[in-house]
Image (cartoon, helix red, strand yellow):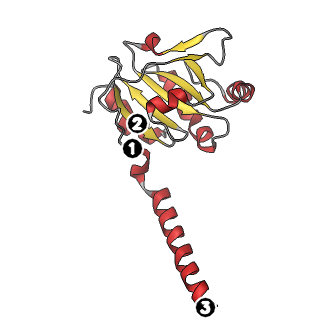
Amino acid sequence: MNRFWIPLGIFAALVVVFGVSLKRAPEKMLVASALIGKPAPEYVMPDLLQPNATVDSATYKGKWVLLNVWGTWCVECRAEHAELLAIQRGGLVSVVGLNYKDDDDAARQWLQELGNPYAAVGVDKEGRVAIDFGVYGAPESFLINPQGVVVHKVVGVVTPELWQTKLLPLVEGKSS
């Protein structure tokens, strides 16, 4: 009987140690992407808020864009929502939402209740656009420069600190 419990106990302890380490690792929010330094994938998606309209990447050429992948099912998406509102109010970047594998009515209700930080919200029910960007969950955000090149990828919540120390300096040209 002890031969069963000892390995199980060791395995459980390792799971806890690795889980805590991953949760606390500050670099988990900054994940290298094959897209960094390359043109962002082009997209045309149905618009969540305007029936019979589309959200087209061509609209944002010449502007800084923070493409934010989110869903109402995503707990961390709620945690970053206030910061996305603040970023949009700042006016330095257009925050574009990619509503990922979500229910349209639930997404509209979410934005009505919490406020809408997005210049536009594209619907990606099947995750095809997300695949083009290499998304594997939500939230994820891509900072795209006016030339249409991905300059940074964030996996996880865009926090005020992350915006101020990593993303904003890129937008303002104070970081390479």
130 or 150: nearer the viewer: 130
Picture residue at 60% right of the left edge, 91% below the top: 2
Q: In terms of secondary structure, where does tag 3 sit?
A: helix
- Name the amino acid type tagged 2: Lys
Picture residue at 63% right of the left edge, 33% below the top: 101
Cα–Cα gap, marks 3 and 1: 42 Å
Query: Total number of numbered labels?
Result: 3
Could you tell me residue 116's position as x and y percent?
62, 23
The quarter in which the N terminus is drawn is: bottom right
Task: Please determine whether, in this image, residue 37 is positioned above or below residue 33.
Answer: above
The quarter in which the C terminus is drawn is: top left
Which residue position holds label 3?
2
Cα–Cα gap, marks 3 and 2: 47 Å
Q: In terms of secondary structure, where does tag 2 sit?
A: strand
Could you tell me residue 135's position as x and y percent?
48, 37
Q: In terms of secondary structure, where does tag 1 sit?
A: loop
- Name the amino acid type tagged 3: Asn
Which residue position holds label 2?
153
Binning the other alpha carbons within 10 Å of mark 3 as few (below 14), some (14 to 19) or many (20 upward) gives few
Which residue position holds label 1?
31
Picture residue at 45% right of the left edge, 26% below the top: 66
- Name the amino acid type tagged 1: Val
Which circle's residue, 1 or 2, is located before the other in the chain? 1
Binning the other alpha carbons within 10 Å of mark 2 as few (below 14), some (14 to 19) or many (20 upward) gives many
Residue furthest out toward the top: 52
